[in-house]
Image (tube, coloured by chain):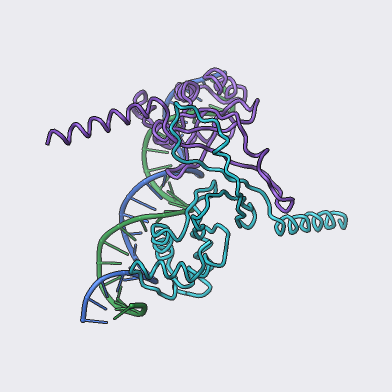
Chain colours: A purple, B cyan, C green, D blue
Amino acid sequence: MLSTDQILEAMSGQGLRITDQRKTLAKLFGENTGYLSAKDVYEHMGRKYSGLSFDTVYRNLRIMEELGVLEQVVFEEGVKFKGSCNQDHHHHHMICLQCMKTYPINFCPMNLTDTPDQFRVVKHKFEVFGYCKDCEQNREEEIALAAHGKEGR
Amino acid sequence: MLSTDQILEAMSGQGLRITDQRKTLAKLFGENTGYLSAKDVYEHMGRKYSGLSFDTVYRNLRIMEELGVLEQVVFEEGVKFKGSCNQDHHHHHMICLQCMKTYPINFCPMNLTDTPDQFRVVKHKFEVFGYCKDCEQNREEEIALAAHGKEGR
DNA sequence: TTTACTGCAAAGTCTTTGCAGCAAG
DNA sequence: CTTGCTGCAAAGACTTTGCAGTAAA
């Protein structure tokens, strides 16, 4: 994962200007391993910048993605962004369906996959979805609460 | 893969009416292993039905997906559909980036993946992208043609 | 000072929905 | 003949773009 400063350095290194808004963006993605939608980002930023416009958020997300400091992934629920992984070592991700945080998987199935000569492989995708420790715990508490609530009626 | 007739039977079994348009849709997905976008489907259908409207195509794709005869997958380029695989045996796919046809992979990396107890796995995705035999051949021919064209100048 | 960034408004793409006439069963 | 299907038009969600004022370097 790139740090907040690494993101900002990459941006200013490309002649981009470091505005307050971009600092907040860099911090958001530098300190968070989860995937965020444009709306998530807008809402996070909105707290700090009252007159914030959606299009600027989109513009900055796109710029950062093109620069390579953000990764864009398409999920069923739509497009989401997260800070780029350092490309040092190839790896895959476990993704929490609740908080959208990611955890690395240092195993690549591609080596073990039997691909016929007939098919020229270009890329692959391996993603594991589930619930991380924290979210699982919250879920259990909610279920317990709901069950308790029912009893009360 | 479901056959054209299996698709139609599933639909009429649910009380859906078998219109001409739906017959064509069933045939399209029954005879084709590739992923198709709503636009692809619209264009295929448009040849036969001049007054075809986009919204009916969307409506039918959605109905068929909810019924389970179609599978919907989100790619970078957008949402695409294909006929459902028979759910008999779990498998993954190799997908041709050119023609979007799919080829089964009877290997599932999930068994070999080391998932910590911390993380409760719910689902996973493993997809291999590349070029199938036919498309690879066409590509090579195009490259050869292009090179030949250059020589001529 | 210069050039890039921002917010506003508007447009563009893809998808869904309400309605009235039409057709499958 | 009854209920669901279709095309039309319109709206909705998400994303992009042109413009003029503002601010970073």
| A45 vs D1: above or below | above
Left or right side of B9 for B101:
right
Please report the residue visible at 39 percent of the width from the left and 60 percent of the height from the top: B67
Left or right side of A105 for B61:
left
Foreground: B54 or B23?
A: B23
Q: Quadrant of residue A134?
A: top left
Please report the residue visible at 54 percent of the width from the left and 59 percent of the height from the top: B36
Q: Is residue A74 visible?
A: yes
Report x, y in % for residue A105.
56, 30
Report x, y in % for residue A126.
56, 39
Left or right side of A99 for B130:
right
Q: Is residue A53 visible?
A: no
Left or right side of B101 for A149:
left
Please report the residue visible at 60 percent of the width from the left and 53 percent of the height from the top: B104
| C14 vs B125: above or below | below
Report x, y in % for residue A38.
43, 36
Please report the residue visible at 39 percent of the width from the left and 36 percent of the height from the top: A39
Q: Quadrant of the C terminus of chain B?
A: bottom right
Report x, y in % for residue C22.
33, 79
Total tally of numbered discs in the picture: 0
| B26 vs A136: above or below | below
Q: Report the residue that reaches farthest toward the left.
A: A153
